[in-house]
Amino acid sequence: SNGKNAQPMDVGSTMVGVQASAALRASFAVLDGKRKGERFILEGDQTMIGSDPGCAICIDEKKVPPRYALVIQRGSDFTVAPLSPEPVVVNGEASKGAEEISLKRGDTLRVGSNSLRFIAPGEVFTLQDNIADRVVDRPKSKFNVVLTTIAVVIIALCAIGGYSYYDAVSKRQARAAKSERATAEERKVAIAKLLRQGDEFLKAGALIEPPGENARERFQQILELDPDHTYAKRRMAEIEERVDQLQAQRLEQEQLQARIAGLMADAERMMAAGELVSPPGHNAKQMFEEILRLDPNNAAATAKLQEISSMMGDMADRVHILFARAQVYYELGQWVRPRGENVYEMLEEVYRLDPDNTLAIESILDLAALVVFRLDQNLAEWDLDAAGNELDTALALKVNPEFLASRRERMRLMGISKRGTIIPPSPADTRDYSESDKQFNSLNTGEIQRRLAKLRLKSRRGDWQDFQLSFESGM
């Protein structure tokens, strides 16, 4: 210790000139100068004297070096040694070099303009009327004997009390340490058990369920016992991450199952309505295929597709029969009538059963083009009755009415004119009917025009009336 705890006090603060708490410690009392009457208790083993504010005994004078002297306590012995080139002056005698000078009761140390009187431990010292006096030099009195006896008794009682207190504190601390060690050992055993259970639950996938028997609760219990347990913290972070992943997967699975259920309901409704493979993009077969894409192991969708496949085999036979009947009705001239026994309805049924059957739609377009071609020929021959029948047939086949409008107008003019009257032919039709076809839900007028051009070319090479359609190969 450097003695920085030395504190000045007033020598006359008690009846005997000393505080009771300082009676057992050595000290210096200032005998003269401006600081006369102050006392400095020597608290540590070493006490520095000088003008530096950091010194335990600070004498702030220009003549006093910053670090003038050092008072050293070795057991019950005290010495003073110089810390600067200035010699230490004790009882008027200067020290030689760096030698230590022993301090005895009553010795006076000169520091600047101040005389510091050394007071030994247990010494009773008073300062009255500017006279420094040692009690030991006075005639003995009963008061001093009584005072000394009281001091000894107090010291003894304090020693006994201090020892008893220290002994009680030591025993209590020992018991507390023993209890703490036992508690720490119990905590260690409990943590080891919780770790084992937590890892087992984690391995088994019991992250947060069932309640009371899951990994997260075990690692939380570990952190309650040891908040800084790194392994438990790492496991908790891992569990939270996996729980988030599982919740996201569960939500995704629920959404998937909801979508599959919707597709299944739509597919079964389409199947009941006979929409097995048509219309394109909205039929039972495609719905079940989409279900299998989302859930390759869906047994219900697989069974339904097998059922549709079986039905499609039967449908192929039915399509073949429908084409054969269409050919018969064509040869009988039953193109759009009577109901249920005509070419158009047979081809429409084929298309409904198999929207991918190009022969069906191509045959309908071929038939429509042939009807329009015959309409034009009948108009050219002034056969209005036959032309009227062909016009009705064309409309029944869903030929665009705007495409037929010029022919209808020609028929009207011919109907109010005499036979042989020259009716100017309609100008070449170059109009784009694509939007109009959508508006009237008509056949593709562009395809009909292309077929009309082929028919006109063929008619120049022979009798167009001998031309026939074959529903095995189309035009």
Image (tube, grey):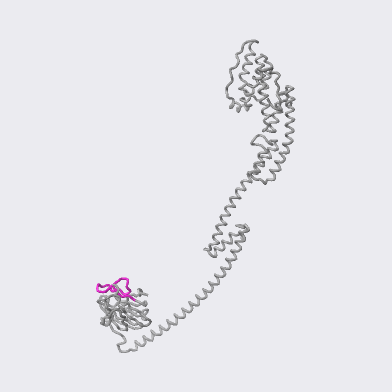
Which residue is painted at 69% across and 33% down in the image? 354
Q: 37 or 415, which lies in front? A: 415
Which residue is painted at 74% across and 27% down in the image? 325
Up-down relation of residue 91 to residue 217 (above or below) = below
- Residue 212 position, x and y percent, is 61, 60
Residue interval drawn in magenta: 47-65
- Residue 3 position, x and y percent, is 35, 75
**Most common secondary structure along the magenta stretch:** loop
Up-down relation of residue 225 to residue 91 (above or below) = above
- Residue 357 position, x and y percent, is 68, 32
Q: Quick check: is 52 in the magenta stretch?
A: yes
Horizontally, residue 158 falls left or right of residue 229, namely left
- Location of the C terminus by quadrant is top right
- Identity of the residue furthest to the front in this view: 461
How many numbered callouts?
0
Q: Quick check: is 61 in the magenta stretch?
A: yes
Horizontally, residue 65 falls left or right of residue 155, namely left
